[in-house]
Amino acid sequence: MSTIIFRQLFDQDSSTYTYLLADKDSGEAVIIDSVFEQCRRDRALLKELNLELKHVIDTHCHADHVTASWLMSQHTGAKIGVSANADVAGADNYFKHGDEIRFGARYLQARSTPGHTNGCMTYVLDDESMAFTGDALLIRGCGRTDFQQGDAHTLYKSIHENIFTLPDSSQIYPGHDYRGLMSSTVKEEKKYNSRLGGNVSAEDFSGYMDNLGLAHPRKLDIAVPANLKSGRPENGELPESEPQWAPLSFTFGGIWEIDANWLVDNLKAVQVVDVREQEEFDGPLGHIADAILVPLRTLKEKLQDLDTKKPVIAVCRSGARSAQATNIMSQAGLANVANLHGGMLHWNDLGLPVAGNSLDPDFQI
Ligand SMILES: N[C@@H](CCC(=O)N[C@@H](CS)C(=O)NCC(=O)O)C(=O)O
Ligand SMILES: [Fe+2]
């Protein structure tokens, strides 16, 4: 069986887990429970792992965050999928119990597990080694049943019939965890789940759930209407948060990077800040013409000397110190900042012009 690539991603604001699964051989991927604000991060990961997103699917219509399904599908062409019972508009695939969601040679099986909402699905990997339970089963907990068609008896039945019947060894990956716990197993939850494990009956469970006393999610009023449209904004337009001043790419490490070939053609439009030391600036790798030298250790004090009317490009030997320079500049409030990926090493590899090295006819020591 072809190997699975698996990543568990976290959104701190809503304590949501997003899961990336891919078939290693074909590079085809599926994302479960994406978060609107994390779409750029997740796209960066797909790019760095060289994966093609086939499906962006939700376990249910979320009440606490807006799904990135629509946004992700706009960027990648992935098909949006959700339960047919979720009453969500704008999806490409509406799943029924038993449907298979294929990516490369592998698939997820959709299992209907209502009770938190009517349209809750648990997605089970083909070999039953992993189950993505959304908000049906959480680690030592479960989804609330006090709004969005919630029903404790239905949830009890769903979990017992369609999750606890998986092999004991199946790993449980929940939609949220509010304590930072990441996974569990069917065996553990059958035995120790505080709300419905061990000998807890449907009546006991219902009594527990009726007295949960949770405050409503902060984003309930924004999230549900947006998610009923697969996370498509009211105006149907892409959020204007992509930088427009240059072709930049965002890394999973959180850095905006500039394309070297664009930079060489647009040097007059930007301020290049070289954050190496003087001897490197004058060394064999040379520097970019008109770059100003501000060693990283002095950058914070020298920020006011920069021409911040222009976008600032940070440069160093390999692209590492300059990445940190972009962090420092962004934290200081500079809006248009990017890193030269690979630094002067990459610049020289590309054969782009350098000043200040021994090959420069104007260079004087
Ligand atoms: N405090 C969170 C809401 C937490 C919450 O209500 N989560 C839902 C998932 S949509 C739930 O079922 N929680 C079950 C629990 O916390 O036991 C927020 O404001 O977003
Ligand atoms: Fe939920």
Image: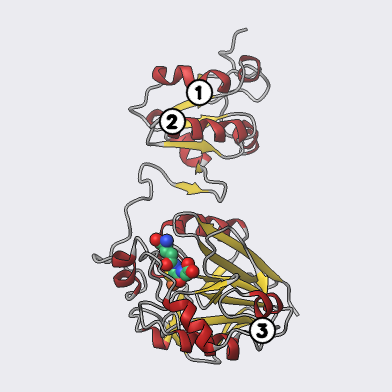
Of residues 246 and 15, the one drawn nearer to the viewer in this rendering: 15
- Quickly name the residue at label 3: 126
What quarter of the picture does the N terminus occupy? bottom right
Instruction: Estimate the x, y position of residue 9 in percent, counting from the top left.
Output: 56, 60
- Quickly name the residue at label 2: 267
Label 1 and label 2: CA atoms lie apart by 8 Å
Instruction: Estimate the x, y position of residue 179 in percent, counting from the top left.
Output: 56, 58
Residue 361 falls in which quadrant of the image? top right
- Quickly name the residue at label 1: 289
Marks 1 and 2 close (CB-CB < 8 Å): yes
Q: Residue at 40% across / 88% down in the picture?
A: 85
Earlier along the polypeptide chain: callout 3 or callout 1?
Answer: 3
Q: Amino acid at mark 3?
A: Asp
306 with respect to 186 (left or right): left
Q: Residue at 60% across / 31% down in the picture?
A: 321
316 with respect to 185 (left or right): left
Q: Residue at 66% across / 74% down in the picture?
A: 192
> What SS does tag 2 mark?
helix
